[in-house]
């Protein structure tokens, strides 16, 4: 691991190319700012969410990639050991049975980088959030 002295980000290789500047303002910038090892997974979850809720707008909110329609519907974010999916606690309660094999707490689903994404489940959760949280 190497910590960039300018932005403080932890990267896998010394002097690794990365987005080294202001806070990301778009999902493209956010993904580009992450370790390149995890970028394909972030692109994958973005595609899953876009397909599930194509009417939602992509933006950055709470410093995370966010799907928005009148209010925040669902976020995702990269952490060191996992990708966080943030559908809200109403959603994690509604899907509790299907999420029992995942690391879930208070509206957060932690998806380990080394496991395949549960595409179909993520899409159903995103659609559920869209239906529940928008007018
Ligand atoms: Zn940097």
Image (spheres, rainbow, N blue to C red):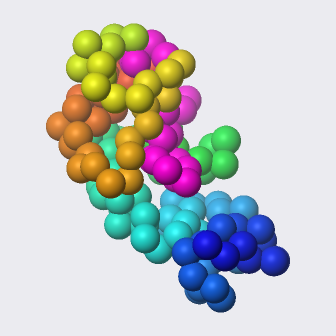
> In this view of the protein, can residue 130 be seen by the observer?
no
Residue 88 among magenta residues? yes
Query: Which region is colored magenta?
Result: 71-92
Between 126 and 83, which is closer to the camera in this rendering? 83
Location of residue 16 with respect to 46 vertically, above or below: below
Q: Position of residue 14 (x, y in %)?
A: 63, 85
Q: Position of residue 88 (x, y in %)?
A: 49, 22
Left or right of 49 in this view: 31:
right
Between 38 and 44, which is closer to the camera in this rendering? 38
Location of residue 21 with respect to 74 vertically, above or below: below
Location of residue 42 with respect to 39 vertically, above or below: above
> In this view of the protein, can residue 8 be seen by the observer?
yes
Q: Position of residue 122 (x, y in %)?
A: 28, 36
Left or right of 101 in this view: 4:
right
Q: Residue at x 41, y 29 (%)?
A: 103
Q: Position of residue 56 (x, y in %)?
A: 40, 41
Q: Residue at x 35, y 66 (%)?
A: 40
| Image mark count | 0
Q: Residue furthest left?
A: 120
Location of residue 79 with respect to 106 vertically, above or below: below
Query: Can you tell which quarter of the image residue 124 is in?
Result: top left
Q: Quadrant of the C terminus?
A: top left
Q: Quadrant of the N terminus?
A: bottom right
Between 68 and 39, which is closer to the camera in this rendering? 39
Residue 77 among magenta residues? yes
Query: Can you tell which quarter of the image residue 16 is in?
Result: bottom right
Q: Residue at x 72, y 73 (%)?
A: 3
Left or right of 104 in this view: 7:
right
């Amino acid at each position: 691991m190497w910590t960039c002295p300018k932005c403080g980000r932890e990267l896998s290789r010394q002097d690794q190319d990365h987005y080294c500047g202001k806070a990301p303002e778009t999902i493209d910038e956010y993904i580009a700012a992450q370790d390149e090892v995890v970028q394909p997974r972030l692109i994958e979850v973005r595609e899953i969410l876009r397909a599930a809720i194509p009417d939602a707008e992509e933006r950055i909110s709470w410093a995370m990639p966010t799907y928005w329609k009148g209010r925040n519907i669902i976020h995702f974010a990269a952490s060191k050991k996992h990708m966080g999916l943030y559908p809200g606690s109403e959603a994690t309660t509604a899907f509790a049975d299907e999420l029992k094999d995942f690391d879930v707490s208070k509206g957060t689903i932690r998806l380990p980088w080394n496991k395949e994404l549960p595409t179909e489940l993520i899409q159903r959760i995103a659609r559920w959030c869209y239906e529940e949280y928008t007018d």
